[in-house]
Image (cartoon, coloured by chain):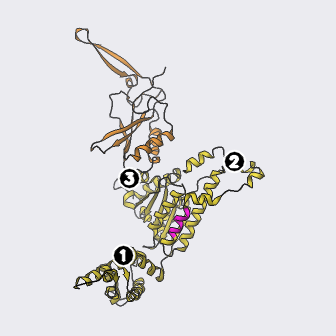
Chain colours: A yellow, B orange
Amino acid sequence: MTVQQDAQNAEDSLRVEALPNDKLAEAVDLQAIVRETQITEVLDQLDRDLVGLAPVKTKIREIAALLLVDRVRRRLGLTTPPPSLHMSLTGNPGTGKTTVAMRMAEMLHRLGYVRKGHLVAVTRDDLVGQYIGHTAPKTKEVLKRAMGGVLFIDEAYYLYRPENERDYGQEAIEILLQVMENNRDDLVVVLAGYKDKMDRFFQSNPGMRSRIAHHIDFPDYTLDELFEIAKRMLGEQGYRFSPAAENAFRRYLERRMQMPHFANARSVRNALDRARLRQANRLYGLSTCTIADLLTIEAEDILASRVMQEPLGSADADRSRMSVE
Amino acid sequence: MAFRLTQGTFSYLPDLTDEEILKQVEYALNNGWAISIEFTDDPHPRNVYWEMWDLPMFDLKDPAAVLYEIRQCRAAYPNHYIRVNAYDRSYGRQTTALSFIVNRPKDEPGFHVIRQEVRDRQIRYTLHSYATDRPKGERYNG
């Protein structure tokens, strides 16, 4: 059932003051609605699939609870203005912002807050035009495509370029604000980006700040969490670490985390891809190999990485990282 | 009885409400048809090329986006005919699969028949919209 239909059912909304006492005591089967929306399933899946991110998960549970209670209230005819769910996700690269946004779209769909539950991911280039009069149609087209779902604007702070006062980004922001306010039922806007840059973006766009109710900060992963992520990624790709390789990969992560341009889970993925490359190259030289060989990443596949060979903090570590990734 | 323009699908029914429009558009989107909005103040049946409101909308998931544009168009042209077209491209050419009016002027003057006598007392008939007696943009203002 959609928000509109629910609202229609409750057209002759009850007034809180006019409720008789026996009506107030009426019990509602909350769990029935929980089962009906299968929301627990989505939340549990989120818990299982995403390593760490405790504050993010708490916030998502809170939002889910709010929407659920909202649904119950609407069903009982209590007037409830639909809550504003536009949100901003801030955090370093590779901390899972896009993944969470996708899950969020699915969750909002299950709870009937958005009608279709698809995610439209865009960046500045998709919203801002190149010449006068180009921006508005472009932004509107993206907004229309996202209606019924979630619009995910990655690196949203690039929309606002204070150094150029004639930048068309401002126009895109204005259209965005207008639609965020007037078509609240039709789409949820999620802004994502690095924390410090987003903070500056909100400071210079107070209108945007006040229209975004939820600010979720994604913490960096710890070493253990990164290692857990690596094991899951390998499992999905049909590989596994040998015991020696596990050890080597932990040491690899320790070093990599201290190097510049570390992008959390994304760096882990890249490291694994390169380890697979080296493993393939190693097997290529053999005359025969077993299934176990094909499955296993050995320590040497990881230790051959440039990250393990260069001294930490050396002057050219930065340059070589750029060439590796 | 007052004249009422009947063109496209549903035109013999009472005007569609916004909810009904949403449902029709939803049906079109579920069939994978692209939606466009057009308007005109010259409702002659042979005037097939109405003016485009914005661009045709591809890749939509939700009908709310179409209603949003219909409302914008109504605000700009409250006294024009506005229609929604759905194009089916599965035949390899632009084929109108569905077309219906979503807005009409408050007062529709209708058409009158012009009889032209030609050679041998033959009569040729043509239709003329009263509205087009006035210049474009002033046709339904009063």
Do marks 3 and 1 both belong to one polypeptide chain? yes
Q: Secondary structure at mark 1?
A: loop
Q: Amino acid at mark 1?
A: Gly
Of the residues under marks 2 and 1, which one precedes in the sequence? Answer: 2
For disc 2, the marked residue is A14
Q: Which mark is residue A174?
A: none
- Among numbered discs 2 and 3, the one appearing first in the sequence: 2
Discs 2, 3: same chain: yes
Mark earlier in primary sequence (3, 1): 3
Residue range highlighted in magenta: A39-46
Residue at image position (48%, 22%) is B2
Judging by the rendered image, the residue that carries numbered circle 3 is A138
Tags 2 and 1 both on a single chain: yes
Amino acid residing under circle 3? Lys
**Front-most of A319 and A30?**
A30
- Which residue lies under the disc numbered 1? A238
The Cα atoms of the two marked residues, 3 and 1, are separated by: 42 Å
Mark nearest the camera among 2 and 1 is: 1
Q: Position of residue A221 (x, y in %)?
A: 48, 78
